[in-house]
Image: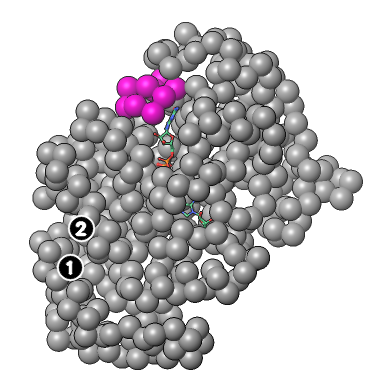
Amino acid sequence: MPAIAVIGAQWGDEGKGKVVDMLAEKAKVVVRFSGGDNAGHTVINPYGKFGLRLVPSGIFSSRTVCIIGNGVVINPEVLIGEIDLINQHGVDTSRLFISDRANLIMPYHTLLDGLEEEARGGKAIGTTRKGIGPAFADKVARLGIRAGDLLDREAFLERLRQIMDYKNTILTRVYGVEPLSPDEVYRQYCQYGERLAPHIRDTSVMVEEALERGEKVLLEGAQGTLLDPDFGTYPFTTSSSPLAGEGSLGVGIGPTRISDVLGVFKAYCTRVGAGPMPTELQDETSDLIRERGHEYGTVSGRPRRCGWFDAVAGRFSSRINGFTGAAITRLDILDTLPRLKICTGYKLEGKMIDYFPSSVVALAKCQPVYEELSGWQVPTNDIRKFEELPLQARQYIARLEELIACPVAIVCVGPEREQSIIRRDIL
Ligand code: GDP
Ligand code: IMO
Ligand code: MG
């Protein structure tokens, strides 16, 4: 049985956590492959409501092994806090494994994320300030500390001293702040290492063996396609790839192991942080969506920017990820609207274009061109069969399907696990 990737198709917060929690019951392994604790994946199930940041959303399914892959950057303090919280709700976490190759977020990463944002002033990216950018930068600069390093204290101390020497020079000379104590960081991270050691493994082998045994493997994406450092709204992006391709690199399996890619879209668009968003609204409709949909960040609590579904961006996302199916979440949030709009093209400097520009300067100038559809104006929360959705809702989904060039396999009509309409079995 091959692996199936679940990917954020827009600017993040599409409902990946809910979809993975729902599908995980049938999976033997669930792996997070990118991002870090900038992610906030909401899961509501019989155990309670959780905003997971590092632990894969499959943890609530008792037979599922959960893995934090090599492509994730891990803040050990956050991870331990999350494990404790999950345990307090009666959920076993002995099935959770961490790649020995995953880079760690260190105290200087979080500190530098904040300092860099301050230095950007009016041009700030609006990062989550969790140290994600600095940690991924260190990974490729070969200045990272990896989970496996915590298992050899002597080698860890030597490497930490060398790296912190350099980091403290930047902190004191560039930013004029107090240096961090390497001994203090060493002591703290040794404690984390002791706690996490039973979970640290060569997880790539574990996934490969599961695939060899014919078991179902789910790859849980974080962030969204339009935050990808290459294909997103650079530089207003995150620092690791949320794309399906990373599902192979961030886990350590070959790309041919991934047979299906499920793109998770909201029925409209949201974005947290700065950067262009062509369909953003600042009127009663966006206020209504924000309040009805509680559109406030899971991690930062920031109000999310809201707007109509952008099918130009959606088609682009579908193409670069190779979606074989889509999940449309939060259809219910649109229940009260009399008219709906879908962006089908952009007008750029007087000319119609049908592609997502690579430059944010161009994207910021794009005017959305809309198609209007009738709303359904009846509650959909309790509907479980596609045929039972109001005609206008089915027409809305059919039009999205056509525009993003990908069949809709799942429609979600509420935050809870059961509030879902499955049109085609994914696993
Ligand atoms: P993720 O980061 O992609 O996992 O998404 P978040 O958890 O950050 O944000 C999605 C929000 O939508 C969460 O509050 C979910 O509980 C909620 N949600 C998911 N699907 C639905 C849905 O179909 N309807 C409603 N009303 N809420 C949903
Ligand atoms: P999930 O997995 C929404 C955004 C931040 C900021 C930009 C860079 O819950 O969908 P970073 O801290 O990554 O350097 O911030 O990316 N961002 C997200 N937005 N959902 C997320 O994750 C996000 N992770 C990062 O708001 O604009
Ligand atoms: Mg989120």
Residue 80: numbered disc: 2
Q: For the residue carrying disc 1, how many other residues have a C-alpha within 10 Å: few (<14), some (14-19), or many (20+)?
A: some
Q: Is mark 2 within 8 Å of ligand 2?
A: no
Residue at point 66%, 16% (across, down): 338
Amino acid type indicated by mark 2: Ile
Provide the major secondary structure of the magenta segment. loop
The CA span between labels 1 and 2 is: 8 Å
Compared to residue 371, the image places residue 188 above or below, namely below
Bounds of the magenta segment:
413-421
Coordinates of residue 287 in the picture (x, y in percent): 61, 33
Quarter of the rendering containing residue 251? bottom left
Res. 121 in view: yes
Coordinates of residue 110 in the picture (x, y in percent): 39, 69
Coordinates of residue 199 in the picture (x, y in percent): 15, 59
Coordinates of residue 180 in the picture (x, y in percent): 33, 83
Tell me the quarter of the image containing the N terminus: top left
Amino acid type indicated by mark 1: Tyr
Q: For the residue carrying disc 2, how many other residues have a C-alpha within 10 Å: few (<14), some (14-19), or many (20+)?
A: some
Compared to residue 183, the image places residue 12 above or below, namely above
In magenta segment, residue 51: no
In magenta segment, residue 420: yes
Badge 1 vs badge 2, beta-carbon distance below 8 Å: yes
Q: State the residue in front, 275 or 401.
A: 275
Residue 192: numbered disc: 1
Q: In the picture provided, is 89 more to the left or to the right than 221?
A: left
Res. 403 in view: no
Compared to residue 362, the image places residue 292 above or below, namely above
